[in-house]
C-alpha cells in the first residue's frame, strides 16, 4: 500500500495513520499538522480526495517527502 501525507483530522475511508508530524510550510497560511497515512481509494489513486479538497496546501508540501515510498503517480 502506498504512503501519503494528509491533513491531521481528515481521514480517507479505509486509511490507516502510521505517523504524525508537524510541518511548517510557508505558503499563504498558518502551520498545519500533517499525518503520514496509508490511503487508497477505490480507483487506486492515493490521496485524490484530499487533493481535490486541499490542493493549495498539498501542492505546497515537500514533493520529495510525499513521493517517498509512494507507488501512486506523481501529484502535480
Image: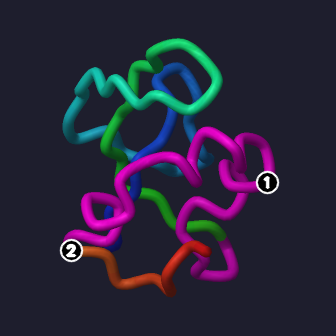
Q: Quadrant of the N terminus?
A: bottom left
Residue 69's tag is 2
Is residue 31 within the magenta segment? no
Cα separation, mark 2 vs mark 1, equals 22 Å
Element under disc 1: helix
x 61%, y 75%: residue? 76
Residue 46 placement (x, y as % from top left) = 53, 68
Q: For residue 18, what is the image quadrant?
A: top left
Q: Secondary structure at mark 2?
A: loop
Q: Is residue 60 above or below residue 67?
A: above
Q: Tell whether 70 sits left or right of 74.
A: left
If you read the primary sequence from the N terminus, does the residue marked by circle 2 or circle 1 appear first?
Answer: 1
How packed mark 1 is, by other alpha carbons closer than 10 Å (few <14, some 14-19, many 20 or more), is few
Q: Residue at x 52, y 47 (%)?
A: 60
Q: Judge from the rendering whether residue 46 lies leftward or rightward of residue 1; answer left or right.
A: right
Q: How is the image coloured?
A: rainbow
Please give the label number shown on residue 29: none
Query: Where does the image place residue 49, in percent across and percent down from the top left?
Result: 72, 55
* Residue lying at 64% horizontally and 25% vertically, measured from the top left: 28
Residue projecting furthest to the top: 30
Is residue 72 shown above or below 62? below
Task: Judge by depth and name the residue closer to the eye, 8 or 11.
Answer: 8
Q: Tell me which secondary structure the magenta stretch mostly adopts.
A: helix
Task: Tell me the quarter of the picture where residue 65 sits.
Answer: bottom left
- Relative placement, left or right, of 25 versus 11 is left
Which image quadrant for residue 42?
bottom right
Instruction: Look at mark 1 in the image and give the residue it sits on.
Output: 52
**Which range is magenta?**
42-68
Does 50 appear in magenta?
yes
Amino acid at each position: 500500500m502506498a504512503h501519503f501525507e494528509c491533513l491531521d483530522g481528515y481521514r480517507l475511508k479505509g486509511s490507516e495513520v502510521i505517523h504524525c508530524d508537524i510541518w511548517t510550510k510557508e505558503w499563504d497560511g498558518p502551520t498545519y499538522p500533517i499525518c503520514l497515512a496509508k490511503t487508497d481509494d477505490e480507483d487506486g489513486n492515493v490521496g485524490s480526495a484530499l487533493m481535490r479538497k486541499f490542493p493549495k496546501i498539498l501542492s505546497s508540501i515537500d514533493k520529495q517527502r510525499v513521493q517517498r515510498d509512494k507507488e501512486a503517480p506523481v501529484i502535480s
